[in-house]
Every structure is written in structure tokens, then in C-alpha cells.
Image (cartoon, rainbow, N blue to C red):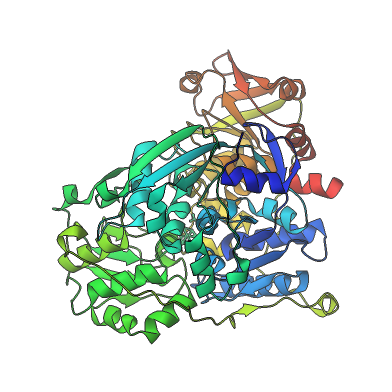
Amino acid sequence: MGLTIAQKIIQAHLLEGEMKVGEEIALRIDQTLTQDATGTMAYLEFETIGIPRVKTERSVAYIDHNTLQCGFMNADDHRYIGSVAKKHGVYFSRPGNGICHQVHLERFGIPGKTLIGSDSHTPTGGGIGMLAMGAGGLDVAVAMGGGAYYITMPKMYKVNLSGKLRPFVSAKDVSLEILRRLSVKGGVGAIIEWGGEGIKTLSVPERATITNMGTELGATTSIFPSDEITKKFLEAEGRGGDWVELKSDEDAEYDKIIDINLSELKPLIACPHSPDNVVTVDSLSDVKCDQVCIGSCTNSSLLDMLKVAAMLKGKTVSADVSLSIAPGSKQVLRMLSDCGALGDILASGARLLECACGPCIGMGFSPNSAGVSLRTFNRNFEGRSGTADGQVYLVSPETAVASALTGYITDPTTFGKKLSVNMPRKFFIDDTAVIEPASPEQAAEVEVLRGPNIKPFPNANPVTDTMKAECVLKVGDNITTDHIMPAGAKILPYRSNIPYLSQFCFAVCDPKFPERAKKAGQSIVIGGSNYGQGSSREHAALVPLYLGVRAVIAKSFARIHAANLINAGIMPLVFANEEDYTFIGQGDRLVLENVFEGMDKGEITLVDKTTRKTYQLKCYYTDRQKAILKAGGLLQFTKGE
Ligand code: MIC
Ligand code: SF4
């Protein structure tokens, strides 16, 4: 039987396990990336593991999330990451150089290589044929130290594209279409390969938009072949030598095949508060906009920005709309400025933000009260914008501009017949904002600079055979990591200060949760399906750990979050009968019995002392995961190895 592209890369990097769907496999990791909001913790963990120099082919530390610097916290963390990177062999992309995924694609990504990043949108690298996955910071730390990355062997889905996008219909609309069809759970446990004749009409930035947003499907990752288009992109980056061809075998088998005819797509929009809440743009034409934001790792490439500039040229943004533009990297900004397109953008009345995540993670530019904000981003979870009642819609850059100009949600295909931009054959290359690490000989002299915001992480808590705990919170389906551990300008600067962060745990669902959990001492959280979807932030596990959470019982879990819980020594458990979810209430006194035997059997008994009922819970832990839980988390497990 032939192999898919992902299976080929997995086969070439397989350290342990068999390529059988559902089995745990261990992969050799060629490259890692971190960003600053998850990076401080990842490097603290790397230091604790105690390996002097990274063993990957390339590891890069980016500063892109925490760039507001209201006080010493972010600046201290930047200095910490810069110095720790220098000491241990990691390249350091300075603040202002751009969003990790955009810069990594431009300057470091290589087709056929494995990449893990402490950010859920790492699959952006799939746009050039990398096997690129989001992971918790600790998994990235272990990989930097030369350790394997463990995943469950995914199913293989294929999306066959045919036709060609019409003018003003965009790669973003392809992402929204697949989300409309599959939902935010539709990609769980799968790698999505994009193929068919239609991919020949999509450039690398467009492909990267699509693989980036595959994260919102819950997919392990998404990948495009590496073809002539990939080659042209790498050549434009002066990296033609990094190109290799990658394609699936003719007789490769897929678990699911989805067909999308690009020519038939219409501009789409995801309504508040979920990326799969998708309708056509023209169905919302009476909705007035307050704010429009263009940027984020989904839509901040030069191609996107040139289209935006072409649409804005000679026009003025509606007086009722505040428009922001954040190019994805210094390279994009420089080229926009050199060709005059930046002038067209600014002349329209747009506000220029720095090359960073910014409003996407609530770092400034929050909308007004109940404001309608159209964003070219990938997530519109409730409260994420920083305005609790903000109404965030996800759109393409084309829809964003058309709407910013009219002041209403506007279908951009009504805008004109043609939208063409000239992409340069060579990109402007300037890597001065990437600091090289010290040589192994000089590394000993590098001092790691730590600020007072860095606090020790929570103590390990090995799983015990009987675990008595109170149900301190019961939540519904699709709880995101933004619910569990919110971000935003006020909280994000404290990512290396777990005690401080703990005050905000589950603030969106129930502000009293931290107090209650602390009082209970040991606790359990009950969740619905797809618990922990969204980001890779391990803080959504470390903070509950700090507050005493010992287990989360849910109908199902998102991949990265389940791994983060185990890494933190918290048991993710699944209801054997989903209906049992209904019977457990907040405040119930719960006991997990015969845990060790249950872990081996794959089924643990839960006794609800309050209602005197007994339930069966499934746990699908591998021997490695059982050992991690018994050790009290991956860090202890790794140190003890
Ligand atoms: C996000 O988009 O939610 C983030 C912020 O980039 C996160 C990482 C984090 O929480 O720091 C992600 O996607 O993993
Ligand atoms: Fe940054 Fe937003 Fe992308 Fe996350 S999704 S990496 S916050 S731009």
C-alpha cells in the first residue's frame, strides 16, 4: 500500500511504535519553535531538564505575543528568553521581527522536516510540506533536549481541491468552508492532506492560511505537497536549496475524502463565538461594523497585505469603523513599504500595528462595548478580544477591507471584477533581528537574566491509588483553553507566574472557581465534549494543578490539552457512558477507586459519595503515560529517567 505525505514523513522520523491508527508513536523532531507567552515556561522546563545545548537541527525562540510591555514583566521575560536561547543553542527572533509562524515559514521551515512548536498554529508549516504540530511547552523542551515527541498515530484525511478561486474569494474562505462542513471537532485524531488539481492555483501563503486554520478543526496537523510552487517560494526567500519534492503515492489510502470545488466557493464568515459558526458573508449584509482587524498568523503574508493595499488604494475607511493592519513580519512590512503599498494602506485611514499577534490574543485594540469586530484571525472565542461582550467575526482580508470601507459586513465580490497583485520574484531578506546562539565554547560565559516575574512552577503530584476530590466545576461542550486560562493584555504578561495567573482560572465560566478549588484542596473538573480545544498553552493544565485539580472527567478531549494534562500529572478521564455527565453535580464529593489497577485495565471506577452512585470512566493511557502520571508529571518523569 502506498503512503500519504504525512505517513512518509512519520516513517522517516519514527523512533518507536507502529504506524497503526490509534497507537502511540514516538517521532524524532528536527526543528522546534517557541513563542514568548509559552516560551518562558518551556525554557524554565528545559533548564530543569539540565541538557546544556539543544540537540535539534534548528530551534528558534520568537517574541511575538507579549509585546505590549506595560511594566517590567514582558521586557524581563524577553531578556530571559534571549539570554537562555543564546546559552543553549537557540536562535532568537527579537520583538518586532514578526509572528512566529509567518517568520518560520519565511526563514526556517523546510519541507519534509518535523517541527513542533509551543503554539497550536505551528501547522502553518504544513503549507510548505512540513510535518508541523502544536505541543505543550514541556513537550517542546523535551524535544529540544533530543527527546522524542509522542502522538497517537492519526487517521489520514484528504481534501481534494478542484477549480480556482474567483476574484475576491480567498484561501480563508476555504478554511471556513471546511470548518462549516466538519466543525471544530471534525479533524480530531486526523492529519489533513490537501491535494487535487486545485492546489496548483494556490501559492504558499494561501496554503499556509489553510494549514494554519486546520488547527480550528482539532486536527493533529494539515499538510500540502512540496511542489514547484513551494520551490518558487523558497527560492524567493533565497532558500531554494532547502526544497525537496514531496507527494503522496498514487495508491495511498485515506480514512476520509472531502471534495471542494474552489470555483463554487462564496465569501464566508464565522459568527460569534466559534470558528465553525459559518454562514455566507452576503447573508449578514445588514450588520454594522465597529472595528476591522487585518493580520495574525492566518492572514498577514505579503500576498494578503498587497491585496488589502490594492483594495484600499484611493479610498477612505468608513468613519464608523476603526481599521487596524498588522503585517506578519518585518520582511512583509519592509516590502510593503518599499513598493508603496504601505502608503496606500495608511492613506485610507488604517492604523498600523506592530508585526505581532496583537489584537488576536487581546493584546490591545479590543473592540468597544458589544462592538462588532471583523477579524482575519483564526479564533473568535468569547472574551478573547479583551472585551467581554465583543462580537467577533472571522473573515478573509478581502471581506475585511470591503466591510471597513462600507461600514457594514460586505461581500467583497460586489467590489469589482478583478483583484490582481504583483508578487515579487525575490523577497527582501534581512535576518538582523534573528540573534544567533553563542558557540558551544562561549556558552558558559552567557548569563541567563531572570526577572522577578519568574516564579517556581507548581509541585509535582503523583497519582495515588485512591483519590478523594470535590467536583468544583462542571462545564459544557467545547470549553477552550481561553476559558480555562484566559489571555489578554492584563493576564498574558504573567505567563511565568502561575500563582498570579491562578486568580483568573476559568474566569469566563465562573470567577469564583479559584477560591472554591483552593478551599477544596483536591478537586475534579467535569467537562463536555472536545474539552480543552484551542491553544497549546500548558498553563491551562499547570494552573489547575496549582489550584489542586487532580483529574478532569469529560466526554472527550482536544489532543494537545489532553497531553498537557498528563504532562502536568492531571488525569484526563472519559465517561464510559456519556449520559453519566448529567448526574454529577458541582459540589459532589467524588472518589476515584483502585486507580492503579484501573489505569492498567483502561477503566476506573468513580464513586459519587453525595449521590451514592458509581460510574465507569475510560482512560487510554500508554505505559509511558501511566509512568508519567505516577511520577507526578513529565518533568519529574524525564528527570528520573
Ligand atoms: C493562541 O492563539 O491562542 C495562542 C495565544 O497563540 C496560543 C498559545 C498561548 O496561549 O500562548 C496557541 O495557539 O497555542
Ligand atoms: Fe498569535 Fe493569534 Fe496566531 Fe496565536 S493565533 S500565534 S495569538 S496570531
- Residue 388 in percent (x, y) is at 35, 53
Q: Does residue 450 lie above or below 179 as drawn?
A: below
Residue 339 position (above or below residue 128): below
Residue 20 falls left or right of residue 380: right
Q: Quadrant of residue 141?
A: bottom right
Q: In which quarter of the image is residue 321?
A: bottom left
Q: Quadrant location of the N terminus?
A: top right
Whether residue 81 sits left or right of residue 409 in the image: it is right
Residue 579 at least partly seen: yes
| Displayed quadrant of residue 166 | bottom left
**Left or right placement of residue 275 versus residue 473 in this view:** left
Name the residue rendered at 73%, 59% in the picture.
Answer: 144
Point out residue 637 in the picture as x, y percentages from the top left corner: 80, 44
How many marks do you count on the picture?
Answer: 0
Q: In this view, does 539 lie to the left or right of 351?
A: right
Q: Quadrant of the C terminus?
A: top right
